[in-house]
Image: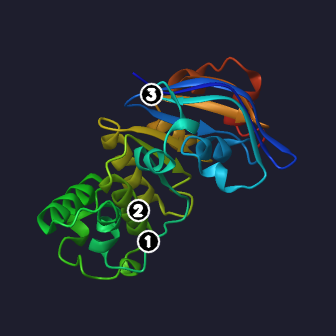
Amino acid sequence: MVEFSIKDLNVWLGSIHALKGVSMEIQSDEILTVIGPANSGKTTFLRTLNRLNELNANLRMSGKVEFHGQDIGGIDIRLIRKKVGMVFALPLPLPLSIFDNIAYGIKMQGIKNKKRQKKTVEEALKQAYLWEEVKDRLDASAFELSGGQQQRLCIARTLAVEPEVILFDEPCSGLDPISTAKVEEAMLKLKTNYTIILVTNNVKQAARVGDRTAFFLSGELIEIDRTDKIFTAPKDKRTDDYIRGKFG
C-alpha cells in the first residue's frame, strides 16, 4: 500500500528553493532512508510530510503530497501530526517523569483511564527497547536517562499515540555506537507495524537499515531504489561519488 504519493513537489523557504520537482511514492511497512550532503533538502522533505514546514511564515509550495490518497493540506493538522510522528536529532524529553513523558500524548487526547495509560506506556517502552532499563524507575525524571535512553524515550512517546508513519531526522547524530545500535534495532523491529522514513548523514546506517534509499542533492531527488542497488550499482555517478565519500 502507498503511504505517501509525492508529485512534482517544490518548496521555497523565503528565497531558497529547497526542493525542486520531487516525485516519489513511499510504501507501507518499509524503512526509506534519505541521504545526501548538507543543504540537499532532506530535512525539508521530511518536514513536508507532517506539515511542520508550515511553521515557517515564508513557506511557498507547489505540486502535490498525498497521504493515503488525500492531499495532506486538506487533512486536519492535528490528525496528520498524530498519524505521522517525528523523532528529532536531539532528544527532547519533557520536564516530567519517564512515565508522564510517554503518557503525555494520550492524556492530551483525553484518555484518563489509569489502566489504559499504564498498558500504553509499557507497550511503547517495550517497542522502543527501553522497558527493561526503566521499568523499576518510571517515576524518575526523564533527564536522569542517558542520551541514548532519552532518544528511545522520545521514540516511545511517539509510538504511544499510535502513528502510522514515523519520521526520524538524524536520530543517532549525537549518540555513541552502542546507543545507535539499539535505536537501529528498534527501527528494524518497528517496520513490521510502521512506515519509517529516516534522514541520516551516515551512509553506513542507511545501508544497514534501509529497504530503499533516496539520494538528494541541491534540492533534487537524484535517484531512489532498493538500498542494495543504490550502494552497489547506482544509476547516477553523483550518487556513487557521494557514497564513496568524494563529496559531502
Please state if 89 lies on the left or on the right of 61 as rendered.
Answer: left
- Location of mark 3 (residue): 68
Q: Are the residues flagged by discs 2 and 1 in contact, CB closer than 8 Å?
A: yes
State which tag comes first along the sequence, 3 or 1: 3
State which tag comes first along the sequence, 2 or 1: 1
Rounded to the nearest angstrom, the CA distance separating label 2 from label 1 is: 7 Å
Q: Nearer the viewer, residue 33 or 109?
A: 109
Rounded to the nearest angstrom, the CA distance separating label 3 from label 1 is: 30 Å
The crowding category of the residue bearing disc 1, from other C-alpha atoms within 10 Å (few below 14, some 14 to 19, many at least 20), is some
Measured as percent of width and height from the top left, residue 141 is found at 34, 82
**Quarter of the view holding residue 28:** top left
Q: Are the residues flagged by discs 2 and 3 in contact, CB closer than 8 Å?
A: no
**Quarter of the view holding residue 217:** top right
- Location of mark 1 (residue): 93
- Location of mark 2 (residue): 154
Task: Tell me what residue is drawn at x 58 percent, y 46 percent.
Answer: 51
Q: Nearer the viewer, residue 233 or 60?
A: 60
Identify the image quadrant of the N terminus.
Answer: top left
Rounded to the nearest angstrom, the CA distance separating label 2 from label 3 is: 26 Å
**Number of numbered discs present?**
3
Please, what secondary structure does the residue beneath circle 2 have? Answer: helix
